[in-house]
Amino acid sequence: MPTHDIIVIGASSGGIEALTEVVARLPEDLPAAVFVVVHVAPRSVSVLPDILNRAGPLTAVHAKDNEKIKSGRIYVAPPDFHMLIADGAVRLVRGPIENNTRPAIDPTCRTAARSYGPRVVGVILSGALDDGAAGLHAIKERGGVAVVQDPADALFPDMPQNALDAAAVDHILPKARIAALLDRLAREPVEAARIAVPEELQKETEIEAMDMKIPDDDKPGKPSVYGCPDCGGVLWEIQDDELLRFRCRVGHAYSSEGLLAAQTEGLDSALWTAYRALQENASLARRLAERAKNSGQKKLIVDRFEERAQSAAEHAETVKQLLLNDKLSAPVDRIEQRE
């Protein structure tokens, strides 16, 4: 009988410490392949495989496209690529960002769930926001095992806590105990019956693999009233039990918190653009007023330019106060505490 031989570990802020400890405690003869996704900047140089190689006995490498999956190896998602798990091989796709990042945890979890069903173990470690929550839900939907670092043990508890809220998690453990659990699961036979791939999961994994053959009227979910922060297209609303998510026509995907964060960032950028434009407008109007005055033009023309400058300066000050109000970008929980 097969075992839980596909392990997906996702981490973000504060997750390297937890991940290093987990890897350090894994045995050399682990009968499973481990897939690691950590949020990294698109153009950064990732040294995570080197860190993991120094931490424990398993060989860690950046995954390569179409690389055959081997037990006892750690595959790390390289910067700017989603790592997808197909039957027997790893796929790297520079597809649309998910949850404001690439690589993202959810695509790896979802494709693993589709390909390997109950053989998959999903692990969510320390991180901000909620990438990995939908992926863990998909793993559970296919009969896999969900493991979450105890939020009280995490440097950043948001990702573990959101995963707990989104999926029926099987194990909640401090980082020091996760490796022993993974070793045990990797040696236990999988007795659960194979569960059919849900239609919505199949559609989403095809989108993540950049298969654009799905017609618009067959997209997962239903059209929402929101626009995609990345491309401006209509977002489709996807409901996974209590978990609300969004995906656009070309594949950009967001959790509800991720969409709020992207909208807030876009609002901040738009306000700074407006502030700059208003300041420039006021400056130009003052210059034109001075020029009209020096050239002896009618007072009516000079006054018109000066009024324009004053109006633009006042509007710029209003926008400035909005930018200085940190509630625009503060986390919801911090706003509630201050209220």
Image: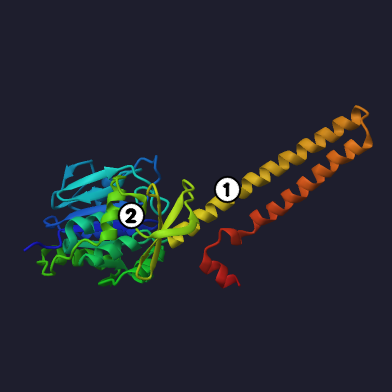
Q: How is the image coloured?
A: rainbow
Q: Residue furthest left?
A: 1
- Locate residue 9 relative to residue 316 in the image: left or right: left
Q: Nearer the viewer, residue 127 or 214?
A: 214
Residue type, label 1: Ser
Q: Residue 9: horizontal and vertical position, in percent?
A: 27, 58
Q: Is residue 254 above or below residue 80?
A: below
| Residue 230 visible in the current orientation | yes
Of labels 2 and 1, the one closer to you? 2
Which residue is painted at 13% across and 55% down in the image? 28
Q: Residue furthest front?
A: 217
Helix, strand or loop at mark 2: helix
Which residue is painted at 9% across and 66% down in the image? 189
Q: How many neighbours does mark 1 have within 10 angstroms: few (below 14), some (14-19), or many (20 or more)?
A: few
Q: Nearer the viewer, residue 111 or 76?
A: 111
For the N terminus, give its image quadrant: bottom left
Which residue is painted at 72% across and 48% down in the image? 316
Q: Residue 85: horizontal and vertical position, in percent?
A: 22, 51
Q: Is residue 183 above or below residue 35?
A: below
Which residue is painted at 30% across and 60% down in the image? 135
Q: Residue 304: horizontal and vertical position, in percent?
A: 86, 40
Residue type, label 2: Asp
Q: Earlier in the sequence, mark 2 or mark 1?
A: 2
- Locate residue 147 relative to residue 297 in the image: left or right: left
Q: What residue is pinned by disc 2?
A: 218
In the drawing, what numbered circle is on residue 96?
none
For the C terminus, give its image quadrant: bottom right
Q: How many neighbours does mark 2 have within 10 angstroms: few (below 14), some (14-19), or many (20 or more)?
A: few
Q: Which quadrant of the view contains residue 68? A: top left
Q: What residue is pinned by disc 1?
A: 269
